[in-house]
Image (cartoon, grey):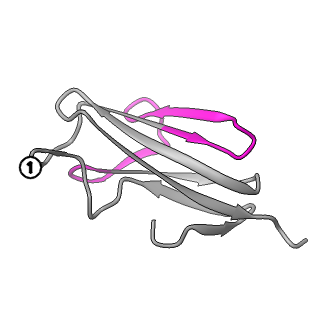
């Protein structure tokens, strides 16, 4: 993600970095399965699965995303896990600033 600070209440797009899509060797590949996990600053972990949960979407070959409404200030972390045809993991984080109102 290019900008890592958001305001509480925002909708944030978490995604596989488009410059580093899922690959097998040097070939961009869609994993057979995709699981997205994200943790809010309170420690609550949410798990979503591509093809089961409509929140997880495919943007292009090897690139997946999900929109999350952030309602807790602090550091959020997320992880995209590929399985099957492409076993790989991508993790990142971002910060949510408290609302001023």
Which residue is found at the position 36% from the left and 53% from the top?
16
In this view, the residue farthest toward the right is 101
Residue 87, located in which quarter of the rendered image? top left
Q: Is residue 37 left or right of residue 81?
A: right
Q: Is residue 8 left or right of residue 5?
A: right
Instruction: Name the secondary structure under disc 1.
Output: strand
Q: Is residue 39 magenta?
A: yes
Which residue is found at the position 24% from the left and 49% from the top?
62
Q: Is residue 41 magenta?
A: yes
Density class for disc 1 (Cα within 10 Å; few <14, some 14-19, many ≥20) is few
Residue 31, located in which quarter of the rendered image? top left
Q: Is residue 49 left or right of residue 47?
A: left
Q: Is residue 77 left or right of residue 83?
A: right
In this view, the residue farthest toward the left is 26
In this view, the residue farthest toward the top is 84
Which residue is found at the position 47% from the left and 39% from the top?
54
How far across and how far down the image is residue 42, in percent? 75, 41
> Which residue does the numbered mark 1 point to in the structure image?
27
How far across and how far down the image is residue 6, in percent? 65, 68
22 is higher (above) or lower (below) than 50: below
Which residue is found at the position 21% from the left and 42% from the top?
30
Q: Which quadrant, please, contains the C terminus?
A: bottom right
Residue interval drawn in magenta? 37-63
Count of numbered badges drawn on the protein:
1
How far across and how far down the image is residue 97, in percent? 74, 66
Q: Which quadrant, please, contains the N terminus?
A: bottom left
């Amino acid at each position: 993600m290019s900008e890592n600070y958001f305001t509480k209440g925002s909708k944030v797009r978490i995604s596989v970095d488009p410059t580093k899509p899922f690959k097998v060797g040097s070939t961009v590949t869609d994993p057979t399965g995709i699981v997205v996990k994200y943790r809010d600053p309170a420690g609550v972990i949410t798990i979503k699965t591509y093809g089961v949960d409509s929140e997880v979407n495919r943007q292009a070959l090897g690139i997946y995303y999900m929109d999350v409404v952030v309602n807790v200030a602090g550091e959020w972390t997320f992880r995209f896990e590929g399985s099957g045809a492409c076993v790989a993991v991508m993790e990142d984080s971002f910060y949510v600033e408290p609302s001023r109102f």
